Image (cartoon, rainbow, N blue to C red):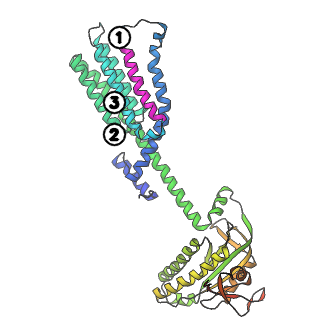
Amino acid sequence: MSTAPTAPDLEEQQHSLQIRGLRFDPDLERPFRGEYDAKSVRYLRVFVPVLIAVIVAPFLPLLAGVPLGAPLTRGLASMVVGVIALACLLVVALRPGLRKWTQASIAFAALVIFADQTAAYAGLLQPSGADPRVLLLKYYAVVAVILVGVYVASRLRFVAATLVSVVMLAVALVTPAVLARPPAGTLAADFSQLLVLNLLAMYAGHSMERSARRDFLALHLLDAERNRSESLLLNILPAPIAVRLKSAPSAIADSFAEVSVLFADLVDFTALAARLSPAEVVRLLNRVFSAFDDLAERHGLEKIKTIGDAYMVAGGLPVEQEGHAAAIAELALGMREVMVKIREDEGLPLQLRIGINVGPVTAGVIGTKKFLYDLWGDTVNIASRLEAQSEVGAILVTEAAYLRLRDHYHFEPHAPVHIKGRGLLTPFSLIGRRAD
């Protein structure tokens, strides 16, 4: 399965387009052709009916009873063939399921109309009193219109248009030379003008497609940059908050009646970091916090921030969540298990302590640069200070959290701890899930 091209990939293709010509890599060529054909379809829905009207208009006097002569009869037959070819093209333009045949249908219609005009020209060369020179000029005028239409009006892609034009030019040179036998100089002069016109049409068609490809790349570069910015924003802010901030870039402040808040801290990590190189410290913290991020995402929780070697996460916001207390408990147990594995892998004395509280909070985005979605209130402060009072490897929860979790998790009473600003508080130690 192919992935969407990144901005550097698109920039490289934009550069190569200027050097090699009209071709993208396959993963970009397919969407370009689909988009280009779709635009061609919209154009043909207007262009083809107008062209049919132009072809039919000269024969409208027949409805008034103008007598038919042989030339007029041949012209009428030619008109019918041209209208049928264009009608087939219009069917493709009107049916979404047939869009993949758009370019082939344009080429087919152009060749049918050209063959029809060539046959009409050959018929008019029969003894009729008409000047062969005039007939040749009229024939070449029709061929010129078809050639220009193939390159410009029909939006046929350049390579296919070139192949169609080569066929037309070959037939347009051979047919008069064999049937009318004009002087070589006359034929060469008339055909050279047609050839010059075709070269100009080729240049116009090539420029149009190159411009279309550059516009397509520019839009994809813009989309890639926008997606990259969206990804960065979503790594900073919760998705609902990011959407609100983009639609109304004003202060965001919400009140939640009940959320779960968890603080975790790596014990004595400062002393450990002093013995490690800066690269090792960053690598180790990245491994630990990345594992915590995965757990938080798995349980539908919102990571709030990291402060040094501390980690803060909440449940039940910015969108209300049923069972957020249980999700926080599962996260805490999972974090403790992760730390055991990392400690064994790294061979370092890594320990964790955790504090959990449940209650009301105020949440919002602060700052105008380096946005931060943060929480405030006693619920947050108590969870943080409870973590600071916790023993190594322990998960301390407040009574509010205990009351919501006691039916499904096993707890042990803990000695009262002193919480700044609240006095003595009796927490519970989360041991694990109940066996039943």
The answer for how far apart the CA atoms under marks 3 and 2 are is 14 Å
Are dots 1 and 2 in contact, CB under 8 Å?
A: no
> Is residue 377 placed above or below 50 in the rendered structure?
below
Amino acid type assigned to the residue bearing label 2 in the image:
Val
For marks 1 and 2, the one nearer the N-term is: 1
Q: Nearer the viewer, residue 391 or 200?
A: 391
For marks 3 and 2, the one nearer the N-term is: 2
- Mark 3 crowdedness (10 Å alpha carbons): few <14, some 14-19, many ≥20: many
Q: Position of residue 11 (x, y in %)?
A: 43, 55
> Which residues lie in the magenta part?
70-94
- Mark 2 crowdedness (10 Å alpha carbons): few <14, some 14-19, many ≥20: some
Q: Which type of secondary structure does the marked residue at label 3 adopt?
A: helix
Mark 1 = which residue? Answer: 71
Mark linked to residue 198: 3
Q: Which type of secondary structure does the marked residue at label 1 adopt?
A: helix
Q: Residue at x 45, y 32 (%)?
A: 91
Q: Which type of secondary structure does the marked residue at label 2 adopt?
A: helix
For marks 1 and 3, the one nearer the N-term is: 1
The answer for how far apart the CA atoms under marks 1 and 2 are is 37 Å
From the viewer's perspective, is the residue at label 3 or at label 2 nearer?
A: 2
- Mark 1 crowdedness (10 Å alpha carbons): few <14, some 14-19, many ≥20: few
Q: Nearer the viewer, residue 127 or 301?
A: 301
